[in-house]
């Protein structure tokens, strides 16, 4: 009656990844950094995506000091602030690898009120990640066919059920739907409005691509990492308060466990029906997606988004003042 679930242990619960190639985006800090560490400790060659070469290489050094086990960690430039940069980043990675067993789309802009242009949250998290995923998809598919399996893991957020993303009238029928202006939500709320929609669109993308997937050994899994303290270093006040913050938030390492479960637990393969195409709360708890995430709406959203990637004048999503980029 009082049995307590054992905490997730990446050492014992992940399979041996020797010979496999993984790519984790936004991995120079936070949850992504920890994800790279544990994939590498299981023997994978892990490409660490970071938009800053300096930060990426410093993170590789830090990881090597912490211990990366039998694996290998390689820095690769990856910036998905614009679809163009995302394509370049994907092509750069493709020029370095011949297989891609595990893709973890982790990097994102969080709901940061310091951002000058909040529409960048939707542009980066949804459109940038979409372009990157579409660039890498053929190699994931080929790897799944040739080596028997590949996994596309998306780090989304429970925020896809909140704020503007829970509005039942939200629709993505035309490019104009992505150009709606939520800055009127105010300096504090607008970043979260954009963030929630970006995480909704990321999840819908995974749902639609899973529906269209014709490769039986390619998995699409989406996760929420939990409520993770990846921010207390940002301000002096939050640094001082971090002992209290840590009572309510989990560590970045614990925040990586759900990504790791999706990327490398043998249970995913053993029980494909339970996990493939699904959304999980930590760790490994398959959970219904928000009400807006139906297959039909997801496919419509994906088709509109792909059209947006090709559309001239689509980005930035909101107009800029003269002189601004
Ligand atoms: N923390 C939470 O409680 C929480 C909850 C739910 C979901 N999530 C999700 O978990 C994932 C990781 O979050 P986190 O808390 O670890 O965030 P974080 O500490 O802020 O790290 C975000 C990472 O994404 C990178 N990034 C941002 N914009 C980028 C761009 N244009 N191109 C390439 N990389 C970019 C950052 O690079 P720089 O260092 O260069 O900025 C950083 O490496 C995100 O998808 C987030 O939405 C987090």
Image: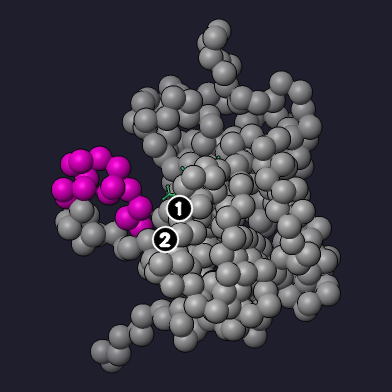
Q: Nearer the viewer, residue 293 or 21?
A: 21
Q: Nearer the viewer, residue 39 or 155?
A: 39
Instruction: Name the residue located 53 percent from the left edge and 32 percent from the top edge.
Output: 120
Secondary structure, mark 2, is: helix
Residue 297 place in picture, x, y as percent: 68, 47
Q: Is the C terminus in the top left, top right, bottom left or bottom right quadrant? A: top right
Q: Which mark is residue 121?
A: none
For residue 48, which quarter of the picture?
bottom right
Residue 217 place in picture, x, y as percent: 76, 74
Q: Circle 2 sits on which residue?
A: 62
Q: Is residue 234 magenta?
A: yes
Answer few, some or many: residues within 10 Å of disc 1's Cα (few below 14, many 20 plus, some between 14 and 19).
some
| For residue 123, side relative to residue 216 (left or right) | left
Q: Main secondary structure of the magenta part?
A: loop
Residue 197 place in picture, x, y as percent: 53, 41
Instruction: Name the residue located 44 percent from the left edge and 64 percent from the top edge.
Output: 63
Instruction: Name the residue located 72 percent from the left edge and 41 percent from the top edge.
Output: 88
| For residue 223, side relative to residue 255 (left or right) | right
Residue 208 place in picture, x, y as percent: 72, 54
Q: Is residue 302 magenta?
A: no
Q: Is the N terminus in the top left, top right, bottom left or bottom right quadrant? A: bottom left
Circles 2, 1 touching at the beta carbon (< 8 Å): yes
Answer few, some or many: residues within 10 Å of disc 2's Cα (few below 14, many 20 plus, some between 14 and 19).
some
Instruction: Name the residue located 54 percent from the left edge and 9 percent from the top edge.
Output: 323
Q: Circle 1 sits on which residue?
A: 58
Q: Is residue 205 above or below residue 194?
A: below
The magenta segment: 228-241
Kindly give the residue lying farthest to the top in the view shown. 322
**Scheme by which the image is coloured:** one colour
Number of marks in the rendered image: 2
Q: Nearer the viewer, residue 120 or 234?
A: 234
């Amino acid at each position: 009656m009082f049995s307590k679930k054992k905490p997730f242990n990446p050492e014992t619960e992940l399979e041996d990844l020797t010979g496999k190639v993984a790519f984790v985006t936004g991995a120079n800090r936070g949850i992504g950094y920890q994800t790279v560490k544990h994939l590498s400790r299981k023997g994978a060659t892990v490409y660490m995506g970071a938009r800053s070469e300096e930060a990426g290489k410093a993170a590789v050094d830090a990881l090597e000091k912490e211990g990366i086990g039998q694996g290998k960690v390689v820095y690769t430039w990856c910036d998905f602030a614009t679809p163009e940069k995302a394509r370049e980043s994907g092509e750069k990675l493709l020029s370095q690898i011949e297989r891609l067993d595990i893709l973890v789309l982790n990097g994102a802009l969080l709901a940061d009120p310091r951002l000058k242009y909040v529409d960048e949250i939707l542009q980066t998290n949804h459109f940038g990640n979409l372009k990157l995923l579409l660039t890498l998809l053929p190699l994931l598919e080929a790897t799944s066919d040739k080596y028997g399996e590949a996994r596309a893991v998306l780090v989304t957020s429970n925020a896809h059920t909140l704020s503007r993303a829970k509005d039942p009238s939200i629709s993505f029928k035309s490019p104009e739907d992505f150009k709606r202006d939520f800055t009127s939500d105010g300096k504090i709320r607008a970043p979260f409005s954009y963030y929630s929609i970006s995480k909704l669109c990321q999840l819908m993308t995974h749902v639609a691509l899973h529906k269209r997937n014709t490769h039986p050994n390619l998995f699409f899994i989406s996760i929420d990492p939990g409520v993770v303290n990846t921010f207390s270093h940002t301000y002096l006040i939050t640094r001082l308060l971090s002992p209290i913050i840590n009572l309510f938030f989990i560590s970045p390492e614990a925040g990586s466990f759900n990504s790791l479960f999706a990327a490398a637990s043998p249970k995913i393969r053993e029980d494909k029906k339970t996990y493939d195409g699904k959304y999980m709360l930590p760790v490994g708890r398959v959970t219904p997606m928000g009400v807006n995430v139906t297959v039909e709406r997801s496919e419509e959203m994906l088709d509109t988004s792909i059209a947006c990637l090709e559309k001239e004048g689509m980005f930035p999503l909101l107009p800029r003042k003269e002189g601004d980029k």
